[in-house]
Image (cartoon, rainbow, N blue to C red):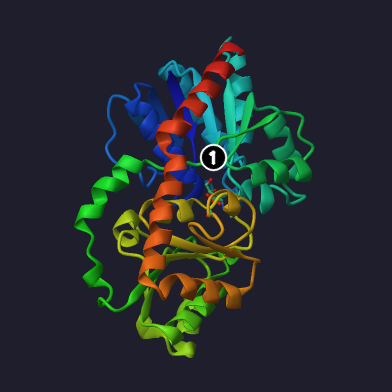
Amino acid sequence: MKIAIVCYPTFGGSGVVATELGIALANRGHEIHFITYRQPVRLGLLGDRIHFHEVHVPDYPLFHYQPYELALSSRLVDTIKLYDIELLHVHYAIPHAYAGYMTKKILEEDGIYIPMITTLHGTDITLVGNHPFYKPAVTFSINKSDIVTSVSESLKKDTLELFNIKKEIEVIPNFIDITKYKKVFTDCQRTLMATDEEKIITHISNFRKVKRIPDVIQIFYKIQKELPAKLIMVGEGPEKEMAEHMCEKLGIHKKVIFLGNSNEIDRILCFSDLFLLPSETESFGLAALEAMVNKVAVISSNAGGIPEVNRQGVTGFMSDVGNVDEMAENALKILKDESTLEQFKENAVRVAAEFDILKILPLYEAVYEKAYKER
Ligand code: GMT
């Protein structure tokens, strides 16, 4: 099929899911057109089957807010016509589903009927979309989508609770390309970061409030009191500066390495022992899955969809949001004994295999076929 994918071109979350999905679909013979304001970070080579169309938003002084939805809809309409695109898949409801619906309506004027799949990712529902200023438009555009998918059972439940949704929501979990990670294990450079005695603990996120960055540091603070360890903090975001100050105040700044955004998180995860994800809310926790496939145990909160990924006492441990004492205790339980650590690491890879892209991709293809037939 010829498929247009609309997403945010971000380092993590929905942008990564959309990009990896598009690349995998292209490998299966589909023709994929990414449409967004910047080339998605995980999108490497473009080619015959992978295209990128940039959305340009003219900067006009009259506008206090530049109308991105308008520019996106116009770019979608033009691209769909130019390339005879058959299906539109939008990731993240705001404002993509809204712009997608307008695109459908504009194309209908020319007798072109294009089905739209909307994939809900989390913050578009739990944090942003639920705001009264957005809610009517978000509800409308979800209900007007031809098919709605959600990345976890938990997010489906939240969506049905928070919005007046009349559509069936199909759960298609996020995924991972197992084969890709197997290859990377061979050139892992642990010595760059820590000594043989030190355990490596990693956190990767966009450093927003919802990630509870102070909890990450508190947990590490407690761990490093008991055993030699380093903390690697990967990502950029509003809480980063505060995090750096907090480490200085606690006197652990020499043990904490801030790496900024990375396009190659597998190179960091491959030498990590433990991943921390104490989030306030998390629809799925893709970062935890990426850690698991790289053989890293996970200490997390039990918020949202995390229990669908991290398995209690198997791949790691979960605690109530904010319970940093228990999270640190559990981390030490795993880290203090080599054979326990190895067992958790093995379990993490095994459970991650449940989310292999080969299992998940056909679910999206089935949804596409259904939407196309019913258009
Ligand atoms: O907060 C983030 O991590 C970014 C956010 C996004 O929308 O890109 O991530 C959401 O979508 C991811 C991919 O489906 C999920 O793995 C994350 O759990 C989800 N984040 C939240 O729900 C906070």
Q: Check disc 1 and give the amino acid type.
A: Pro
Q: Position of residue 256 (x, y in %)?
A: 38, 78
Where residue 119 sits, quadrant-wise, is top right
Q: Residue at x 71, y 43 (%)?
A: 157
Which quarter of the rendered picture does the C terminus lie within? top right
Does residue 37 appear in the picture of this structure? no
- Above or below residue 333? Residue 163 is above
Picture residue at 45% right of the left edge, 87% below the top: 225
**Element carrying mark 1:** loop
Work out whether residue 39 or residue 356 is closer to the camera in this orientation and state it: 356
Quadrant containing the N terminus in the rendered view: top left
Which residue lies under the disc numbered 1?
A: 173
Ligand 1 within 8 Å, label 1 CB: no
Q: Does residue 234 appear left or right of residue 105 in this picture?
A: left
Residue 258: horizontal and vertical position, in percent?
38, 72
Looking at the rendering, which quadrant does residue 180 occupy? top left
Compared to residue 349, the image places residue 259 above or below, namely below
Q: Is residue 157 left or right of residue 78?
A: right
Instruction: Estimate the x, y position of residue 249 in percent, counting from the top left.
Output: 49, 89
Q: Is residue 357 above or below residue 375?
A: below
How many numbered circles are shown? Answer: 1
Query: Is residue 26 visible in the rendered structure shown here?
Result: yes
> Which residue is most to the top?
111
Query: Residue 76 appears at what percent x and percent y?
Result: 50, 28
**Is residue 230 shown above or below 368?**
below
> Dot 1: within a 10 Å radius of its alpha carbon, few (fewer than 14), some, or many (20 or more) residues?
some
